[in-house]
Image: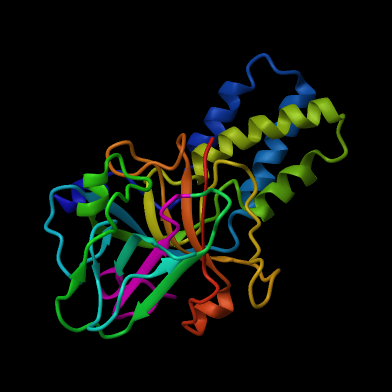
Amino acid sequence: MTSERFEGLSFTPDHDAGRAALEAALEGASPAVAGLARAAYEAGAAAAEAPARPARMLALDMEAEITPRGGRIGGPAWRQEGAGWPELDGAPMLMIAQLDLAGLALEGLPQAGLLQVFINRDICILDTRCVVEWHPDPQGARILPQPPGAQGPFPEEEECARGFAIVPGPSGAMRPTVDDAAVQDALRGATAAADPVAGGQARDLALDALAGALNPAWAHHAGGHMVSTQGEVTLFGGGRDAPGIPLDRCILRLGWDEETIMWGDAGEAALVIPAADLAARDFSRAEFTWDGC
């Protein structure tokens, strides 16, 4: 059953399909635009070859049992004895994720324990503050429920309260998406000397084709690269100990799925952190971000 969830999915970009989609879209385009679009596609594809990062596909199971120390989205939180529920500005937060790190077994992340992510229960798109707790050796089965009335990005309060179990899938090296700054720079560079109108048309055509080849066909993953619906992704921490530090590592990406979790209108969410902080297992500057169409 688990393997069927991920059947046909691959971490390898499908540039054959991407180039075919581009040629179909170029029907009727001027020779100048067609040439620019092909050049832009190849430049973007080359830029996406460099920083592959370990990732693991994830699925959400609406039927699986929710266990105290199991991985899940939403639902009750394992809490050590004496620990309460995190608050933000005096209000209880929403636990958006509890990751079973041993079950993920993903290079770059801790290999044991639980990683819990609490966010603003009002799901404010401008508020990236979160509380991320790593429990290296959780003991016991004490759990606390989500705060009364919490719904967050879930279809109903009942789904938020119960949660959805995380099903780990295949792991592999994930290439950047079309939202990566290097890919965007390559597209701009390939069309920079062209007429602005023709260059803009070529970039758009190449971008759409590249999205089909590079962007993941699965909704959720741990590690890898984040995905955005708002174009180029360049995130920097702000308003804390050291504003301006790049949030250049993705711990968790949660996409849009009308049956389980929805970020606005077909949006994307991600837990991101500075690379040095992740290596040091310091999650105090991690931020949770989401966007929508």
Q: Considering only vertical position in the picture, is 107 above or below 169? A: below
Q: Is residue 143 magenta?
A: no
Q: Nearer the viewer, residue 41 or 153?
A: 153
What segment is highlighted magenta in the picture?
100-123
Q: Considering only vertical position in the picture, is 31 above or below 212? A: above
Query: Could you say where residue 243 lies in the image, as x and y percent from the top left?
Result: 69, 71
Residue at 49 percent of width and 45 percent of height? 215
Q: Is residue 61 left or right of residue 258?
A: left
Asked whether residue 178 is in view, the answer is yes
Query: Could you say where residue 106 lies in the image, as x and y percent from the top left?
Result: 36, 71
- Image quadrant holding the C terminus, namely top right
Q: Is residue 112 magenta?
A: yes
Asked whether residue 163 is in view, the answer is no
Query: Could you say where residue 199 lies in the image, as x and y percent from the top left?
Result: 79, 31
Q: Nearer the viewer, residue 271 or 34?
A: 271
Taking the view exactly as shown, the residue that stands out farthest to the top is 28
